Image (spheres, rainbow, N blue to C red):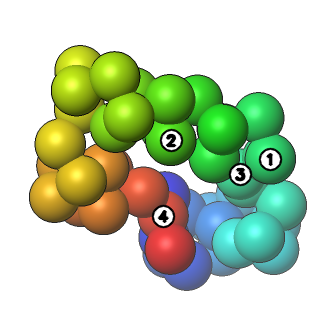
Amino acid sequence: MDARIANARDAEPASLITPAHVAEMAQLVESGALTDRLARRSSPW
């Protein structure tokens, strides 16, 4: 998600992702199920 989505939801961008989301993304990259490049494209930051 990006700032536009956060604004539409009247939320802070940082509040839209949790440490659990980051950990799940890291696990997918480490397991090879998700490439680092795709992980960056799908992340809001």
Relative to 7, 14 lies left or right: right
Residue at position x 30%, y 62% in the image: 40
Q: Secondary structure at mark 3?
A: loop
For label 1, the residue is: 19
Whether the residues at callouts 2 and 4 have beta carbons within 8 Å, the answer is: no
Q: Is residue 35 above or below residue 33?
A: below
Q: Secondary structure at mark 4?
A: loop
- Amino acid carrying label 1: it is Pro
Packing grade of label 1 (10 A; few <14, some 14-19, many >=20) is: few
For label 4, the residue is: 44
Answer whether residue 10 is visible to the viewer in this image: no
Residue at position x 48%, y 64% in the image: 44
- Amino acid carrying label 3: it is Ile
Dot in front, 3 or 2 = 2
Marked residue nearer the N-terminal end (4 or 3): 3
For label 3, the residue is: 17
For label 2, the residue is: 26
Distance of label 4 from label 3 (alpha carbons): 8 Å
Give the image location of residue 15, x and y in percent: 83, 61
Give the image location of residue 20, x and y in percent: 76, 35
Distance of label 1 from label 2 (alpha carbons): 11 Å
Residue at position x 50%, y 29% in the image: 27
Q: Secondary structure at mark 1?
A: helix
Distance of label 3 from label 1 (alpha carbons): 7 Å
Packing grade of label 3 (10 A; few <14, some 14-19, many >=20) is: some
Marked residue nearer the N-terminal end (4 or 1): 1
